[in-house]
Amino acid sequence: MKEFYVGLISGTSVDAVDAALVAIDGEQFQILATHSEAFPEAVANDIQALVRSPGTINIDDLGELDTEVGELFAVATKRLLDAAGTPASAVRAIGSHGQTVRHFPEGMSPFSLQIGDPNLIACRTGITTVADFRRRDIALGGQGAPLVPAFHAATFHDPGELRVILNIGGIANITVLPADGAVFGFDTGPGNCLMDIWIQREQEKAFDRDGAWATSGSVASDLVAQMLGDRYFRRIPPKSTGREHFNYRWLEAALNEAATRPVPTDVQASLLELTARSIAESIERHAADCKRILVCGGGIHNAALMQRLTALIPGCEIESTANYGIDPDWVEAAAFAWLARRTMHGLPGNLPAVTGARRPCILGGVFVGEPT
Ligand SMILES: Nc1ncnc2c1ncn2[C@@H]1O[C@H](COP(=O)(O)OP(=O)(O)O)[C@@H](O)[C@H]1O
Ligand SMILES: [Mg+2]
């Protein structure tokens, strides 16, 4: 039976709320409409401030932001459905990832915290909302991340070849899809986040369009080697990370340790190199025979980064997920629509081989919608 779902996510880049309306009919999956809702600058700044300052969070700020982000996710949904001409009553459920403000999946009391109150989303839209996707997996000893590999497997697996799905968001993650149907995946480390942070500080631009600024500089090999020495890159999966680790403090510490501090342009070139190398080395180590990489996430638009990846991974076709039916900018939002369906049908959404959880489980809390 054909059902409609909405997927909502704002990633670690805090660039926008992505909303996708999808139709799912058994194995058939189709994106019907998309909408991107920009963050008001004040909200984006407040989120960045929360993400930047571990240990100093003010509960009042957190509570207010939870409400503001929830309202924004509801607005994004309404605008999506208006543009699509689809009534809320036609949508079985929303899958809202929310906005991650902390991801600490290890230690004595691991947790991952996404904000964007789902009560508000259910109330304002009238649509049942599935949210808080990560914590059941963490309760079962998993990382709670990445969660997109199950969707990647359902959508992009090919029985004829080993494929890797590479998502370059703020953080980059890979899903390894061997021909036999097994699934494996993890966060490789920084995606766009370090390049974004540096150009934001040095040039007050949101991101380095096409990697043009990075291309105008020279890679400082010592700095890249030193940054690649970070323990995260050597860790064996399951593993996941976020801006709690790869942030401005991390970068500043690396620059302070460097024998000579490169000029800003060369730092950007080095961050692009670090991003490409850490991704390429992860693929080499965990999917050495890979013949095809399907790329999604905002990083696919960074032409210089894509060129560097192509050079570092010879013998492998690097393509956009668009060639396989899903626009690369909408894979993550689509994944949370797909995960909401899993929950509504009582099906597990996590993959223990990816997250390290003790077993598969039904993800998220269900906030029942009331017709408005
Ligand atoms: N034309 C472009 N050139 C370079 N980078 C780009 C371009 N378009 C998008 N990006 C990068 O993609 C990021 C957004 O990617 P996205 O997949 O939305 O990440 P997230 O999931 O963290 O929100 C931007 O912050 C930017 O770094
Ligand atoms: Mg985004």
Image: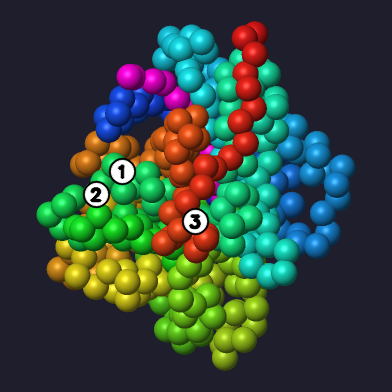
The residue that mark 3 highlights is 359
* Residue that appears at 38% across and 67% down: 279
Q: Nearer the viewer, mark 3 or mark 2?
A: 3
Range of the magenta residues? Answer: 1-12
Q: For the residue carrying disc 2, how many other residues have a C-alpha within 10 Å: few (<14), some (14-19), or many (20+)?
A: many
Inspect the magenta stretch and tell me whether residue 16 lies in it: no
Q: Quadrant of the C terminus?
A: top right
Mark 3 or mark 2, earlier in chain:
2
Mark 3 or mark 1, earlier in chain:
1
Q: Is residue 206 above or below residue 129?
A: below
218 relative to 98 in the view: left or right: left
Residue 68: x percent and y percent?
A: 73, 32
Pointer 1 with pointer 2, Cβ within 8 A: yes
* Residue that appears at 58% across and 40% down: 364
Q: Amino acid at mark 3?
A: Arg
* Residue that appears at 31% across and 25% down: 25
Q: Is residue 247 above or below residue 351?
A: below
Residue 295: x percent and y percent?
A: 31, 52
For the question of whether residue 201 can be seen, the reply is no
Q: For the residue carrying disc 3, how many other residues have a C-alpha within 10 Å: few (<14), some (14-19), or many (20+)?
A: some
Picture mark count: 3
Label 2's element?
Answer: loop
Label 3's element?
Answer: loop
Q: Is residue 1 above or below residue 44?
A: above
Q: Residue furthest left?
A: 160
The residue that mark 1 highlights is 154
The residue that mark 2 highlights is 157
Q: CA distance from mark 3 to mark 1?
A: 19 Å
Inspect the magenta stretch and tell me whether residue 3 lies in it: yes
Q: CA distance from mark 1 to mark 2?
A: 6 Å
Q: Nearer the viewer, residue 120 or 352?
A: 352
88 relative to 181 in the view: left or right: right
